[in-house]
Amino acid sequence: MSVYTLPNEQGHFGKFGGRFVPETLMKAVIELEQAYEEARKDPGFYSELTGLLKQYVGRETPLYFASNLTKHAGGASIYLKREDLNHTGAHKINNALGQALLAVRMGKRKIVAETGAGQHGVATATACALLNLDCIIFMGEEDIKRQSLNVFRMELLGAKVVSVNSGSATLKDAVNEALRYWVANVDDTHYLLGSVMGPHPFPMIVRDFQSVIGKETKEQFFIVNGRLPDAVVACIGGGSNAMGMFYPFIDNKEVRLYGVEAAGKGVNTSYHAATLTKGKPGVLHGSLMYLLQNEDGQIQEAHSISAGLDYPGVGPEHSYLKDTGRAQYYSITDQEALDAFQLLSKLEGIIPALESAHAIAFAIKLASKMPSTQNIVVCLSGRGDKDVETVKTLLKGEVRNESN
Amino acid sequence: MNRIERAFKLLNKTNSKAFVPYMMAGDGGLDCLVDRLILLEKFGASAIEVGVPFSDPVADGPTIQRAGMRALQNGTTLRGIIEELEKAREQVSIPIILMTYLNPIYAFGIDRFVEAINNAGIDGCIIPDLSLEEEEMIAPKLSEVGVELIRLVTPTTPVERIKQISSKGKGFLYAVTIKGITGTRIDMDKELYSFLNVVKSFSPLPVLAGFGIDNHDQIMELSNYCDGVVVGSKIVELFNENKMDELKQLLSINKKMSQLT
Ligand SMILES: Cc1ncc(COP(=O)(O)O)c(C=O)c1O
């Protein structure tokens, strides 16, 4: 059995990944790599992180057999990995705490981060409050409108939220501004990147901190069923919850890995975020990865009903897993996600984040084509509280009852 | 010998410093690119950096960001710029250096790009998001055709790395004067001078200082520590506001810099 060891020393996953950043940042990026190599060998670091994940975040999160959803889909059994039950309501806190501890280790007491949905911003602001670090969050103007409650949460937690109105005023532009801020403040500031993207070592670090999701899933599933699931499913923005779920299963070739992108209004319109389906390899935000771009290499705006999936790139490791065929990537439209959002709420009493609703919608389709003896685990990356207002507006206050 | 090497040889012989303006191609329309290059040469530029607009310019401040957006709205493409520069080559004799983020090159195709800029008579290429660690994908190809890859060092670059970076290529070394993006105010302080001294002492290549430079006093002061300057945001602003007299005045420093040394 071959053992998966990527990225290599240059931070490459095949041709993807790498370190494509202005020279000003190279020292910080190399220092981060060194600090992480030391930290990962230090049992003290991990016991502190594991302690916080247990006592503060509430891990481990349950692996829940969704019997009503399974019945509805009429095929394979569907399990939900309940990342929505984490403190702050999504998987983002796993990475935020890990990196905040790393920053403290490096003697950096100022944190800058980008956020899309606001979940990573809230998680970062939370970790900073806990560890007494200064926190500045860049967020697109559009997203600030869509996720106003999360803006207020971040402010309550003591973070400064800066509105970004360049470009499409969404996540990609927030990353640009966060990088510019980091360039100017690199001596005392750590950039707490929120997904498996950016220059090496970020994609690796974020994956490693998120892989607690897949590790727990593997054990929990084994205890109940005495084997591994047949498939795991996760939504893809930058790709961190998916990478966290996939990584511990990568060498278990019998487990199929499915990533679900946002098809927005449809992959054949110009309003989607289906990077792996419709994009081409290119370089953005420090890394070679699939990108939505025009033929001149200008980055295109992504669109999704969910702010957290609204990104025109996708992590380099997913780009690699797609090209090698180890993982498969599909997309789900705004409407399908909206339907799944309501369906899961009604059937299971769980209101999912709109991001996670994409994974649910795909899992239902997948399960229906698989025999009832097989099993799927879906990463329920976050809870839907932040989206309730958006969905209410979209449904004009009327929840459809088609699923009853 | 490449036009850049020749230009620095000549500056050296006459004890002169280089003044390199940066302009955004396509800002004000691509049709005026050639005329602007001719004008900059006439005003006394030693070489010209031509910026390629990119949707996500992470190393640039608001002035160059906005210029890039205007250029993109005008429909400017890398291919169009290279075509114009090929025309300009017949009328402009100083070195022309293309400054572009990596993705437009990657989308164009690296091999095709190298061939196209070489055919167009472009002398050098600055790629601000291409690190030393990743340059293998393009540097050998540029070097093969004799187009110089201009590398950057910054105040955060450790000494060992400055040595490593400056040992490459034959053009010049670009010393970024600030920890920050283009157009940020520069601190003319001891820290900056000692950084430039360090760079100068290790670099076998001529050293040009750039980022945040916008007036004669700074330029005169900086020319004590390096072989010349790159002026970006200020030039972009003057072109955009059509202040040609001020532009001429700014570039006239080139003569003063030369007399000084
Ligand atoms: C609940 C939730 N799921 C998924 C994502 C997408 O990010 P990633 O693909 O990195 O997991 C986000 C991002 O904000 C999120 O809030």
Image (cartoon, grey):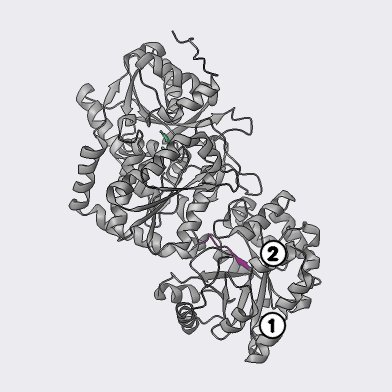
Disc 1 residue type (three-letter): Asn
B6 to the left or right of A387: right
Q: Quadrant of the N terminus of chain B?
A: bottom right
Residue shown at 54% from the left, 72% from the top: B186
Q: Which residue is mark 2?
A: B237
Residue shown at 68% from the left, 87% from the top: B256
Q: Nearer the viewer, residue A81 or A6?
A: A81
In primary-sequence order, the first of circles 1 and 2 is: 2
Task: Give the magenta part as a residue range.
Answer: B125-130
Q: Is residue B87 visible?
A: yes
Residue A321 position, x and y percent, is 43, 40
Compared with residue A252, is residue A69 higher up or lower down, i.e. above or below?
Answer: above
Residue A59 position, x and y percent, is 24, 35
Q: Which residue is mark 1?
A: B254
Assess disc 1: are there few (<14), some (14-19) or many (≥20) residues with their C-alpha within 10 Å of its C-alpha. many
Disc 2 residue type (three-letter): Glu
